[in-house]
Amino acid sequence: MREALAAREVSAVYRLLRKHGVSQRQIAAMTGQSQSEVSEILKGRQVMAYDVLTRIADGLGVPRGYMGLAYDETTAIRVVGASDGRQAEEDESVKRRRFLAHAAQVTMGAAVFGPESGTWSEAPARTPAPGRIGTTDVRQVEAATRALRALDYQYGGGFCRDAVVAQLSWGQQMLDSSAAEQVKTRLFTAIADLHSLAGWTSFDTGLMDSARGHFAQALDLAKQGGDHHLVANVLYRMGRVYLHQDAANDALKLFQLGQIAAQESGSELAVAVLCANEAWAYAMMGNEEQSVKLLGRCKDEFARADLASAESWVKFFNETDVYAMTGTVHTVLAMKNPEHTKYAIPALSRAVDAYTDDMARSKAFMLSALATNHLLEGDIDHGVKIGGKAIECAESIKSARVKDRMRPLQVEAERRRNNPDARDLADRLKIFYAA
């Protein structure tokens, strides 16, 4: 194997893996390739591209030096957290399938072929961590995560992502420090939560591959820490990434896996969050009946939830967020059936009124959706007024996701350009997107 790696004979590497019982499907899942690509390589197709070779090395857990691929600490510092370019050639559907397979393995059982913790993202140069850690060290990680998450909510992922990644580069190596078993378990959860935040802020800034990598790391660590709550959280967040990419079917599968973890955790609030997001996925797929049914279950689970003792990650989901999700789902349904505006507008209005300045991004989302519904309903004056507020709110947030979520408003404003007020709103949105 070492000889094959040194010669970069990937076909020989794959044949050796097959000889020892590793299937083509497993190789494809680990290296991010399709089975047809793996089959072609097994038949002798040469792999020459540096990016592909490094991804294969990382996927198989092989040190890059074995393949003569230069990669030193300086290079690692420059590329940490920005792995999107490395995987750019890979088809997005392949990436989604690979992550879904990994999520299913973590949620339902052990990985099929060796540890994958090193295959998702590289480690930067790090400030030395203590040789032995205690509860105080873990609390510091938890406190930093809470503070950075608050910044993300208020100002967007673009404001704090670099700080999250920097904190992670230090916290990650604490996993190699010695500690009591109880401390180690808590550390797994703390670092998993920090990876989850890194994934969320990456998603918010449009770095989808980085987001996927951090969420995969978070899943592994949350599972090691035995934290079903956090597993559900990570699956929910990655499902939201896929919703954002209009891959509702893949998103639904992750939400359903998350539902398993949420139910194992015994948290009605976590179950409510997953139900709301499943409803969103079904709405995008045009399944009105299932969407409405799951919204109803979300409200029932929320009513039963013990909010005071809920896990920290899920405490964000309060009554305001129930209204926000209800309005969001009905907004999606209203795009095909404007009758749903009568359900969306009251729910979104309640959410907008309740969101404070520290939830500016969520407020921008709801203002945009509310304005869209008013335009769909034919109330252009009201829609334009609220649309202006959405732009003002969004301008203070560093988030690519906000711009993406405001696209429906832009589309509806453009459709009504014959109205002077709607035309002004469409022009304001053009300036906003150009900024």
Image (cartoon, rainbow, N blue to C red):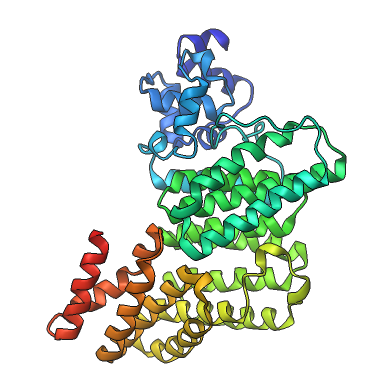
Question: Residue 236 sits in which quadrant?
Answer: bottom right
As drawn, 169 above or below 22: below
- Say which of 124 and 84 sits in front: 124
Position of residue 344 in the picture relative to residue 428 (left or right)? right
- Say which of 112 and 331 sits in front: 331
As drawn, 97 above or below 404: above
Number of numbered labels in the structure image: 0
Quadrant (top left/top right/bottom left/bottom right) for the N terminus:
top right
- Say which of 346 and 343 sits in front: 346
Question: Residue at coordinates 47% horizontally, 12% vertically from top-left?
Answer: 68
Q: Residue furthest left?
A: 418
Residue 122: image location, x then y, percent: 54, 32
As drawn, 52 above or below 327: above
Question: Residue at coordinates 48% horizontally, 44% vertically from top-left?
Answer: 210
Residue 206: image location, x then y, percent: 40, 52
- Say which of 193 and 50 sits in front: 193
Question: Residue at coordinates 38% horizontally, 42% vertically from top-left?
Answer: 91
Residue 422: image location, x then y, percent: 20, 82
Quadrant (top left/top right/bottom left/bottom right) for the C terminus:
bottom left
Residue 372: image location, x then y, percent: 33, 80
Position of residue 355 in the picture relative to residue 434 (left or right)? right
Question: Residue at coordinates 34% horizontally, 83% vertically from top-left?
Answer: 386
Q: Report if residue 291 is visible in the image.
A: no
Q: Report if residue 318 is visible in the image.
A: yes
